[in-house]
Image: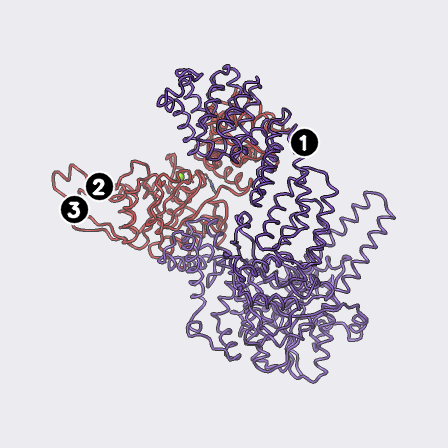
Amino acid sequence: MTVSIFGIRHHGAGCSRALVSALEEFNPDLILVEGPPEGNDVVKYVAAKEMRPPVALIVYPEADPKRAAIYPFADFSPEWVALRYAFARNIPAQFVDLPVANRYAIEDVIEAKNANRSQENASENNQAEEQVEIAEQIENDQEDLELVESIREDPLGTLARMAGETDPQRWEERVIEQATRPGAIFPIFLDAMTELRRAMSDAECWQKIETNNDDESPENEREENALGLDLVALAKLAQTVARASGGNVEDLEPLREAAMRRSLRAAIKSGAQRIAVVCGAWHAPALELDSTDPKRRALIPKKSDDDALLAKLPKVKTSATWIPWTNSRLDRRTGYGAGVEAPAWLAEIWRVSEEAARLDKICGKSTSERDRARTYDDAATTFLARAARFLRDDKLQAAAANVVDSARFANSLAAIRMRATPNLDDLRDAAVVVLCNGEQTIYRSIQQRLEVGGELGAIPQDAPATPLAKNIEAERKRLRIKREELSRNLDLDLREEAGREKSKFFRRMAFINAPWAIPREDERRAQGDFRETWTLKWNPEYDVVIVDASKYGATLLEAASNMAAAELIKAESLASVMALVERALPAELNDEAMALIFRRLRDDVAVSSDVNDALTALPALARALRYGSTRGRADSRLATIFDALFERVLLRLHEVCVNLTDDLAERVVEQLAKLVDAVMTLEDDERLAQLLDTYERVALETLTSKFIVGALARTLYDRKRWSDERLAEKLAFFIGRATPPLEIASWLQGFLYGAGQTVLWLDALWRVFDLWLANLEEEVFIELLPLLRRAFESFSDTERRALGQTVANLYAARSHSDVADAGSPWDDPNARALIPILEFILSGKSLDVDHKE
Amino acid sequence: MTKKSSTSKTSAQAPSAVIRQHAEQEYAEELAAIREEDNFPKPENWLTSPKMTLLYLLGGKTPKGKEISPKYVGDPRLMEMAIATLATDRALLLYGLPGTAKSWVSEHLAAAVSGDSTLLIQGTAGTDESALRYSWNYAQLIANGPSPEALVESPTMRGMRAGKVVRVEELTRVGSDVQDALITILSEKTLPIPELSSEVQAQKGFNIIATANNRDRGVNELSSALARRFNTVVLPPPATLEDEVTIVRRRVEQLGRAFEYPVETPAADELRRIVTIFRELRAGVTLDGKTKIKQPSGTLSTAEAISVVNNGLACAGYFGSGKLTAADLATSLVGAIVKDPAADAVAWREYRQTIMKNREDWKDLFNACKEIDE
Ligand SMILES: Nc1ncnc2c1ncn2[C@@H]1O[C@H](COP(=O)(O)OP(=O)(O)O)[C@@H](O)[C@H]1O
Ligand SMILES: [Mg+2]
């Protein structure tokens, strides 16, 4: 019986290459792969034809699916290679590790304990200082743990970086190139890790290494040289790890390795003759059960100790399945980490490798002629050619001829940097210098597409899914919506069944926190209409979100309705309840949810007596009402609430229109405008008339802020309540009452707020205004100037020009119709003298002239 | 030809009386040592291999332990890229803000690769095609008609014949139509002389290093046809305070030696103050990132910081006590910062009053500056 341990770097494409050769050589009859044993239920899908990485194995506690542990695999991940190899050769394969079921249960226990401890601490020591100390201690532990984890997670990468290599991938390749045969790197890695871990478990040992590294045995030296490392650095690293794990961090590591050994012992007992173990390099020394070297054996606890450790572990109930994954999230850790650097590049060089072709052959998959003929150099050129293509996609210059030059440049750069072939750094530099005019920012704009890519994996249809995921998938198919990571727009026609169904589907997805499609900005306004535009962008994390939402229901409708109800409880203001109503109605949530939402809305409206609240809620309510009525689903509950709020506004609008700061006044004006718009969409003349009556009344009240009076005058004019003459008359009356000039400027600001074309040709109004201006005293005029200019701020240049024209023609028009205007009160030459001033006000030129004088 | 060999003879007998020596003269010793030990493969007609050129630029030790001074302080990758460009036979464009060592690097590259940094065309708005191609000696031309003797060769032509690097300074100041003359030279590697029905074919080793200033952006932007023939390496301002202090110190020491000022090089703390002022005004924020500052209109480059210190030294040496004081620095400091008397003066006064004034150990400098401004 032989056990061979292959310690790898997760997602290390170089390790994958070595692994193919090594497995072929070793010819195992059982393969154990580091991974959660829960995955064994679904490992068989690896061999399925539809399975296409990147994919992730996901294991989740059934009671709390969002705590899912995720194990992503790319084509080039060594674990994936091992599994593919196993199935192709009909060799049983198993995941070995501490079950996620135990891990989460243990974490729960630890968390509870920590919470207790800090509570105890809190009650014992009231002193602030000690509190801080404890907090710091916890923080330090956290940092230490993170350091330890990062070294454990990628010890080979850490060593590579210590050896001065920026790209661990290249380091792997180099080590492989230098090894007698690719498979020979595994014993080398094993030895390095053994040294590291021995040093860690034995504080004296690293000191010995540090002082005596000349006395190391010659083979040892050769091995270390092959890795391009020095032992002192290795020992220092070990020291760091030892110190960090010596702290009181809670550590699952011993449990995990005990569990791996337990599985290995069971495998040996089962009679397997040639067992291959593929695990993170870090764990390799802990699994060398058959080592005869006493120093190595010292790293391995006895079976009885392991069994004792693993006895009676707490446990939660978990499920496992596969989900499609993306290149951008290939980090192995739970949650969504930073990811593997440049996975698209890794995939590319894996594809062109001899070993990938060999594995394809073993798996009975034919490699295309093109792929077979390609080399590393071709991969590098392809990389640069893709860079040029993305640049051209962005309408930037990138001549195809330069791709060849950039590839030559990358080689020359690699030579200066003492490398045989260009690595990712060299290729990036080549792209920047030759293709991007030396601009890093240009490269960054294509980096994601180039180095990561939007590739989305696929899983077989019959892989287990949560009921919710199945329901959503069925809906997706029925509605013919594609999962695409690149965003694109979709126009829906709501008069058609399919359009309505899709719209509902997206809205419900948003409720379960998977906003697959987002309504376009302009979509809201078009809602009364029968068109909607959505931006679609699938995000693979939604698969996890869906698993999480599974606890809310087995169908999308049910889950969305229940999650909406949960959201309702958290909603704090009338506005947020209103927003929920607006999302809930078109999503057609179930009756229970809608009843809850309406009850809450009614209660809130009854409790609140705020006019502002009413102003905020009404437009949304009007939209909701209109939405229902155009679809023949008018809801009387909504109408009742609307009426109550509308009534409140009619009676008490004046309250919110007094004593306002500029900002507040603007806000009220916007709300008033929205309210009119909203009532207009209801096509209810009676209500509109009531509202305009109210506006008119408020506009004539002396206390109303003048900015609002101006704005209301504008509304009344725009809605044809006031004619040109009436408007001019009101302004003249207002001016005539000896109103302070500041207030008139304010009025004008309100009137012109939001610009708009209609006022440009209001001759009657401009005449009144013009006359008033002409009669202002100079001092007052200068004082008002900034305010007046602000009033015209929102006008575009064209509008200003048009207005200038209007003003210039005020008098020209009069000379055409002398007779009609014979009795006009103003005097022509005087008025003409004003034109330059008006033009100046409208011109938007700097006011500096005034200051300098 | 004869003239050139005589200059190189004088350079061997350092110190020479020339105010500013070419890089290949000033660093003749380093270059000789490097070449002697250079066993790396060299492109044809290169005097120094790419690997050793890198050593020459970045400084360090030769395999036999000879100390080489750093010429460029900053990210080594930029120099690797510049050299790799020349090694692949593509033209090199050094691009960046003023005073970021573009000309400096170009000169040293030419010195190391071709042993000659003098094939230089200074680009200005008035640079015409003949400066890039060739012109005629009119007396000869009228007397004997077009003949090789009447031809006045441009540096480009000489570089092509000899297989050397030719430098074009401030390429974007040259008019676009004139720039286009470079396209043929770079793509065909020949320079036709229709008047003589002949041409000059470039020998291997010929290449062009151009510099361009991104403050000139949009003036005579390179045409895309020309840009395609250049690799662009952007030289950034020094990344850290320490880098910049090192650059200024090195250069000041070196110039001090050349001019033989009767003063010692200033203390590191003094340099750090000057460089801090430059960096803060350049960035528009104090080094600790806490206070925003109005930015003056000038570039405030490292090169200007160098000349501020240099002027200060000259002042101290010839008019002052022989020891560099804040007063010696203040005049040229203010001069370097206040370029536009209206706007810059406001920015400078604000900086002086709100930042300099509050720094405990800056009192002398603050007072000296204040005195000048009033
Ligand atoms: N990163 C740097 N390394 C070394 N010297 C530098 C650096 N940046 C600036 N300098 C110095 O500043 C001066 C820059 O001048 P120059 O090369 O003429 O700038 P540019 O041509 O970019 O305008 C040179 O004397 C050089 O010594
Ligand atoms: Mg220059």
> Which of the pair A518/A721 is nearer the observer?
A721
Report the Cα–Cα distance between label 2 and label 1: 87 Å
Q: Looking at this view, is B156 or B344 the one in front?
A: B344
Please provide percent x and percent y for residue A403: 39, 58
Location of residue A415 by image quarter? bottom left
Name the spot of residue B175 as percent of width and height, x first. 30, 40
Residue that mark 2 sits on: B135
Q: Whole-Å distance between the Cαs marked 1 and 3?
A: 92 Å
Question: Disc 2 versus disc 3: distance between alpha carbons?
Answer: 11 Å
Using the image, name the chain to which the residue with label 1 belongs: A
Disc 2 crowd, CA 10 A, few/some/many (<14, 14-19, 20+): some
Are dots 1 and 3 on a single chain?
A: no
Residue A221 in view (yes/no) = no
| Element assignment for label 2 | strand
* Circle nearer the viewer, 2 or 1: 1
Q: Residue at x 51, y 24 (%)?
A: A729
